[in-house]
Structure formats: C-alpha cells, structure tokens
C-alpha cells in the first residue's frame, strides 16, 4: 500500500465509476427520445405496432434511467472526497452549473417520470405524451449542463481568479458557451442517439432471427430494426461530420491532445495518418506503423502539406498518455466508420425490399448491439485522458486538484466501489439483458371494422387504447 500513489488511485477510481455512469445517461437520452417518437407515431397513425414497441422499451428505459441516477450520485461524492481541492477552486464556477442541472433537468425528469411510467391508463393520451416529451427534453437539458461543465474544464473562458486562488465567474455566457461546448454537445448527443439505435437494432435483429427460425413474422421486431437502420444510415454520416468539426476545434484549443491522437511526436508538414501502430514515447516514434502519407495534415488542415504541431512542442511532463489516447481514438473511429457502412448496406437492402431477409445483416446488427457503448467509452477516454495532466486545461493540474489523502484509504474505497459496482450494476445489466431477450408482444388484429387490436404476451393482453387485462 505504501508504494501506491494516492492521486493515481483516485484517478483510477474516478475513471472506473464514470465509465459505468456514462453508459446509462447516454442510453437514457436516446431511449427517452425513441419512446417519444414511438408514442407520437402511435397517436398520429393509430397503428398498434408503435404502442407495442413503446411498452417493450418503457420498462428497459426505467431500469437504465434508475441506474444512471444512482451511479451519478457517486460521482458527486467522489468529487467532494477525493478531489476536494478541485471542488474548492472551481466551485464558484461549476457549482452553479451543476445546480442548474438539478433544478431544471433533473426536476423536470422526476416530475413527469411517474406519469410516463405508470400513467398510461390513468391520464389522457395527450397528457401522457406530454409527460414522455418532458422526460425526453429533461434528459437533453441534463446533457446540456453536464457538457457545459466538462467543456469549460477543457476550454475555460469567462473566468477570473480571486485573491484566494478560486476561479470565479466574469461572464456567465462565456462560461456556459465556451469554445468547445457546441461541438462537444452535438457530438455527445448524437453519440447517444447512435448508441441507442444500434442497441435497439441489435435487439430487433435478435428477435427477427428467432422469428425466422419459427417461420413467423414479428412486426414489432421489424419496426425496431427498420427504425434503427434509418438512424444508422442518416445520423452516422452526420456524426462523422460533427466529429471532424470537433477535431478541428480541439486542434485549435488542445493541440497536445490531437498530437497524441495522431501519434504525432514531431512537428512536421505533410504528417501521415497512422492506421495502425504502437506509440513509443521513449523513442518518440510509432512502431510497426501502417500509415497513409500526408493524410493527417490533409484531414486536420485541409492541406496535404499543412504543418501539424507535435508533442515535441510541449514539456514532457505535460504529455497525455499517448498509447491510451491513440488507441481509444482509433477504436471510436473504426466503430463509427463501421456504423456508416452498416447504414449504407441497410439502404441498399431496403431499396431491394430485402432489409429483413439478410441473415448476414441481422448477424452483424446483433454483434454491433453494444458498439455504441464501446465507442462512447473510447471517445470519453480520448477526451479525458487527452486533457491530462490538467483538470482545468492549462490552469489547474490534476496532481494539484486531489485531496490530501493517504494511498491506503483511496485503495480501500476503490476496492469497495469495484465490488459493489459489479454486484449492483452487474445485476441491473443482467436483468436488463433478460428483458431484451423476451419476445415483444405480438400484434393481432381482432376486428378490422372496429379497428380493435390486442397485444398478446405471456401474461397480459393489452388493447390499443392502452388498457390491459389478464390473458387467457
């Protein structure tokens, strides 16, 4: 224990807990919007398949939302215990922003969540849809404030430093809408939508596979899969464009991070794009490199002979962990390009009216169900590890932000968190996956004249007006 570093352990603990946490809010944002779209389409068209899909994902959303809230509470606890110096110095700026998130976004979500989850048979259709919309808007508002906080730590503006060394607000507009905030907000929310789309598409593909084996036609699974593939085809290319703009913004404000992403140790013109390689910070080279000449300069400067700043322009103790940033960026990018390819593939099959008849596409969709989660984590590692050695970029170092704790104390709390997280959240994830493997309710037309429809599951039958009764 005496050989361990307290700051390193605190960083590992924060990385561990936030890696768990970020998954759930991202899925909550995407699923809340998806549920609002499903309910809106049901109210507009009256087609029961939308209501069946809505009810299927509503329970899954509630569990994911709950795990996001619980894991988020832990983050606040850690900031106050392991990072008390950071809290003291940045509190006048970041404290109000976090308070705005609670007072606006969280209260909005909490106020309407009960109606959304349990009110379909108790309030009118319009009011229930309004509640679903408010929950969805609340998740987006939460992302707005949280990303404003994180973006300010990446590109701090609108601040002053008082006589005791605290950051204080000089201009609230510049604090909230700091230089990287618009790009970070667009990139993260789009990632949340894609993350949800591929999860929904993977679940839909799984049930389509099972239906094909039984010679059945699962309309709800077809709807899930179709909507997910539309999202992949339309939004994944948009995410590539947003990511490019975000990268150019990062190059302007955090050039050391971009240098680590590209494995660019030396400042040079016509920098190559490394597709594969092993960054070696000792020799300041990328070993076993597979590269495209001048491609990095072309992408980042739009000039094949453009100059890119390398890590040699920064003190060695201000370098981020190059291998982690380098490989995390490539994992994120590879998954993003694969998503675009899957979206284009689905468009081709859709045009040939064979979207649901390709076993290969269904298999790929199942494999890619967690791909959005992996890409989100990889992108977050690029963002946070690439900012090191600072908590507030260029102003407050991580080593100066930590609480004066002994390493054994931090090690015990880290071990405790790991045990509790794997038990509690492991059980939650396991139960959520169990729900995803259950077949969606079957839509059966009973009377075409009266437009009566029932949804049959193992336990209940649900009418199209939202009421339920025990199934025979």
Image (tube, helix red, strand yellow):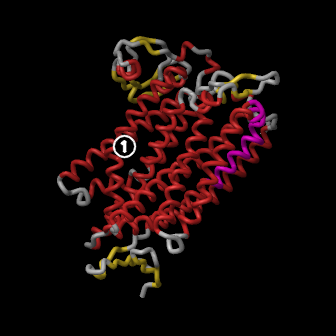
Question: In this orientation, which residue lies closer to the viewer: 407 or 333?
Answer: 333
Q: Residue furthest left?
A: 352
Question: Which quarter of the figure is the C terminus placed in?
Answer: bottom left
- Residue at x-position 63% and y-position 45%: 101
Position of residue 117 relative to residue 301, above or below, is below
For image coordinates 52% across by 42% down, the residue present is 377
Task: Find residue 310 and report its horizontal and vertical position in percent.
Answer: 50, 16
User: In screen coordinates, is 396 left or right of 177?
Assistant: right
User: Residue 447, how many percent across, how many down?
Assistant: 29, 82
- In the image: residue 405, left or right of residue 209: right
Which region of the structure is painted magenta? Answer: 69-89
* Percent x, y of residue 47: 33, 68
The verdict on residue 308 being magenta is: no
In this view, the residue in front, 109 or 20, is: 109
Q: Which quadrant holds the N terminus?
A: top right
Residue occupying image coordinates x 58% and y 61%? 113
Q: Is residue 470 above or below residue 362?
A: below
Q: Which residue is mark 1?
A: 235
Relative vertical location of residue 86 with respect to residue 199 in this rendering, above or below: above
Chief secondary structure of the magenta portion:
helix
- Using a 10 Å C-alpha cutoff, classify the residue at mark 1 as few (fewer than 14 neighbours), some (14 to 19) or many (20 or more): many
Q: Does residue 3 appear anywhere in the picture? A: no
Residue farthest bottom in this picture: 472
Q: Position of residue 102 (x, y in %)?
A: 66, 48
Q: Can you see residue 365?
A: yes
In this orientation, which residue lies closer to the viewer: 133 or 270? 133
Q: Quadrant of residue 49?
A: bottom left
């Amino acid at each position: 224990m005496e050989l361990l570093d307290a700051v390193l352990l605190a960083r590992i603990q924060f990385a561990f807990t936030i890696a768990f946490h970020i998954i759930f809010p991202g899925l909550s944002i995407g699923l809340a919007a998806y549920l609002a779209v499903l309910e809106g389409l049901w109210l507009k068209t009256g087609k029961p398949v939308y209501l069946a899909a809505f009810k299927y994902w509503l329970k899954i959303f509630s569990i994911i939302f709950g795990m996001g809230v619980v894991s988020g509470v832990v983050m606040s606890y850690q900031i106050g215990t392991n990072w008390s110096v950071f809290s003291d110095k940045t509190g006048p700026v970041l404290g109000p922003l976090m308070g705005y998130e609670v007072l606006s976004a969280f209260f909005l979500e909490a106020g309407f969540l009960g109606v959304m989850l349990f009110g379909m048979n108790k309030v009118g259709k319009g009011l229930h849809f309004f509640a679903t919309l408010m929950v969805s808007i609340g998740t987006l508002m939460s992302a707005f404030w949280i990303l404003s906080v994180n973006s300010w730590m990446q590109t701090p503006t609108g601040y002053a430093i008082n006589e005791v060394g605290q950051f204080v607000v000089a201009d609230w507009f510049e604090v909230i809408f700091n230089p990287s905030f618009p790009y970070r907000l667009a990139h993260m929310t789009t990632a949340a939508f894609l993350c949800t789309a591929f999860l929904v598409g993977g679940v839909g593909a799984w049930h389509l596979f099972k239906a094909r084996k039984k010679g059945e036609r699962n309309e709800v699974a077809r709807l899930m899969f179709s909507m997910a593939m539309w999202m992949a085809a339309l939004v994944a290319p948009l995410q590539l464009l947003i990511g490019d703009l975000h990268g150019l913004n990062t190059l302007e404000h955090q050039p050391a991070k971009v240098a680590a992403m590209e494995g660019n140790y030396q400042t040079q013109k016509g920098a190559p794009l490394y597709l594969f390689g092993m960054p070696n910070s000792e020799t300041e080279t990328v070993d076993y490199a597979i590269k495209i000449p001048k491609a990095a300069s072309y992408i980042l400067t739009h000039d094949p002979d453009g100059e890119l700043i390398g890590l040699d322009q920064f003190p060695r103790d201000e370098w981020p962990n190059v291998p982690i940033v380098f490989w995390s960026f490539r994992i994120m990018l590879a998954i993003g390009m694969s998503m675009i390819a899957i979206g284009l593939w689905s468009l081709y099959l859709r045009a040939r009216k064979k979207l649901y008849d390709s076993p290969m596409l269904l298999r790929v969709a199942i494999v890619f169900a967690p791909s959005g989660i992996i890409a989100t984590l990889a992108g977050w590692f690029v963002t946070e590890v690439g900012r090191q050695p600072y908590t507030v970029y260029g102003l407050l170092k991580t080593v100066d932000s930590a609480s004066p704790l002994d390493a054994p104390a931090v090690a015990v709390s880290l071990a405790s968190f790991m045990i509790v997280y794997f038990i509690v959240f492991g059980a939650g994830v396991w139960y959520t996956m169990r729900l995803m493997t259950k077949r969606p309710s079957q839509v059966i037309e009973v009377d075409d004249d009266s437009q009566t429809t029932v949804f049959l599951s193992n336990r209940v039958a649900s009418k199209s007006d939202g009421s339920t009764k025990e199934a025979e």
